[in-house]
Image: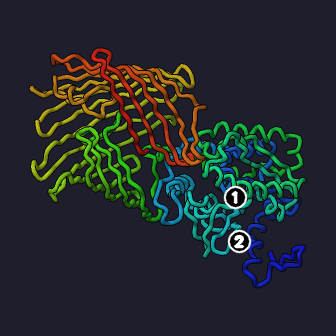
Amino acid sequence: FGSRIYAQGIDAASGDDLLKAAVPIVYGESAFLERMAARTGGTREAVGLVLSGGSARAFAHIGVLARLEEAGIVPDFIVANSMGSIIGLLYAAGLSPAQIGDLVSRTDIASLFDPVLPLRGGILDPGRFSDLLRSYLGELRLEDLPIPIMIATEDLVTKREIRIAEGDFYTVMEAAYALPVYFPPVAYRGHLLIDGGITNLVPLGMAREYSGRVIVSSTFYDARGLNLRNPLVILNTSIDIGKRRAGVEDLLAYPDALWIRCSVESFSFMAFDSMDALVAEGYRSADAQSDSLAAFQSGGVDPALAAVRTRYWRELPSAFLDWSRFGRAPSVNPVVSMTAAVDSFCYPGDPWFLDDSLFAGVGARFRYGPAQASLAGGYDWQAWSGGNLVPAASASVALYPWPAIELEAVALARWPGDDPVPEVYLRSGVIGAFPWGGGGSRLALASHMEQIADSENGTGARLLTSSARIELDGAGLPGSLGLELGHQFDGPGNDHFAFGSIAVRFAPLPEASLRAGGLTRIGMNAGALAPFYRSDPYLNLDPSSLSGKGQTVAAGSLSAVWEPSWLKLSLGELILVRRVALSVLADGVWTIGADDEPSLVAGLSLACDVSLIGLQSNYLLAQVGLDPRSGEFLARLYLVSR
């Protein structure tokens, strides 16, 4: 890319940095061209493929790639930006469309982007997403991939377009989708790179510089019903105007390119949970161009690419299995981030029993290799016991010495009064996770110790809980089944308890299910009165009135659940409410061996995920209930970090 003379007679190669803004900087172009030539053998013109940005809509490219391969088309080079770069890089690395779809569908993408304070320029940390892909694919460089690929980015330093065809795979990928404000800019050879889709959603002109035979797959956005008075919608739409216009100008300038206009323009850019529908639409859109595809034959999958895919088919199942245990992958580089810290205890199903508070503050997180840790300061709200808001600090560490084992320790210190010595809640545990079958089936073995200590009483409550839990899900079952058996030792009273629980979900329809659950906790020694904990997942007026009343406590629940997949709410295209579940329920708790009447509550619940741009999510649960005998009403609200 040398001197460019424009119609006005301006020389873009002059010494004026402002005029150089129109001239891209390219890395790795020579090797990129050599690899293209090697693929064609000099006997035909190279076939290029452009994959546009489009956030979640870019999942449609997976379907396009599948249809192209059916037509015997594997591109000789790829040009991509933004989210299209993720699909393009995975494909260039040798994964088949089916393998890409499998990788994405097995991963809860929303859990991989941690919210952080924007000290590095973004409010989401992409590191865990890169760690996951590295655990699947190993170390990669762009110049070594089976298919040549060039990624378009923009540089905050030079204000110029940066085109990258060489370098670390994961660094370039993070730069490719570094949407300003949401993700931090990425350092690369003295540049600070952001998402190239911010200026042109469809970089077709870039691909045409290398070949006249180009296929372009686009995923524009044309959602209706947006509130164009909302400031966030105005900002997003203002950015979209420029990049859409530049992409359309490229399409109009090169009408000989085969344009596959994916029919996903009504999907939100946050629709990361709609992958199957997006892939299907991409396939259908490419199939509509069947008559034109014959002109782009490139020989299909060659033996070298087939060998790479065979290796991935052999290695990926083990990597998927390791990921499914705890939803994490080792971090190759040490990472420290500052973040808002929110830890909720005592929600229904919480595996910890002795704490009933909500901690909120600011802290630091660290992860490296098989370890992660956090340290935070803020305030603790003891919602169940007086509702006092007191200064607090928390620390945690987790180690993964083996993929199937997690070691965890947590400390939470509170200062409820003038005493400089805090009240301390401590917990530690070991968990073994053993999934199987490729679905949601797993065996979990766990042992946890909890205790509370303060300056007045010394070591107070202590509870050791050990359990084995088996979950059966998938494998053709019209629902799921969970069974747990365990033992608890209550230290202060030297009491032993055996407990068991069952949870059954029967789903006769895709969006409707019937659920039933049961719990029994039995004192095993004389005088042992069974506890009922606030985190036991059964709605009742006052958990403390049911605890320690008899040698056995039993609980049961019946509910009908509706989960409408279409019910989603977007707040300014920033906050997305999805995975909504509406339930009608009836819960009962009995203390056997006591004269008290059982607790019976009928109620309603609303559960949903609340996520930031469709990625990092929190679980929101609202419950209301009525005791039909006393007429007393209750309401509960929980917000749990995923």
Q: Is residue 103 visible?
A: no
Residue indicated by mark 2: 160
List x then y, in percent, for residue 593. Answer: 16, 18
| Marker count (numbered) | 2
Circle 2 SS class: loop
The numbered dot on residue 197 is 1
Q: Which class describes the residues within 10 Å of circle 1: few (<14), some (14-19), or many (20+)? A: many
List x then y, in percent, for residue 144. Answer: 66, 64
Q: Quadrant of residue 63?
A: top right
Name the quadrant of the N terminus: bottom right
List x then y, in percent, for residue 581. Answer: 49, 30
List x then y, in percent, for residue 216. Answer: 79, 52
The numbered dot on residue 150 is none
Residue extending farthest to the front is 229
In the displayed structure, does residue 550 sit left or right of residue 429? left
Q: Quadrant of residue 191?
A: bottom right
Residue extending farthest to the top is 629
Residue extending farthest to the bottom is 15
Circle 1 SS class: helix
In the displayed structure, does residue 189 sit left or right of residue 452? right
Please report the residue visible at 26 percent of the width from the left and 42 percent of the height from the top.
387
Q: Between 600 and 549, which is closer to the camera in this rendering?
A: 600
| Amino acid at dot 1 | Gly
| Amino acid at dot 2 | Arg
Please report the residue visible at 19 percent of the width from the left and 18 percent of the height from the top.
592
Q: Between 325 and 613, which is closer to the camera in this rendering?
A: 613
Q: Quadrant of residue 7?
A: bottom right
Q: Between 71 and 501, which is closer to the camera in this rendering?
A: 501
Comes first in the chain, label 1 or label 2:
2
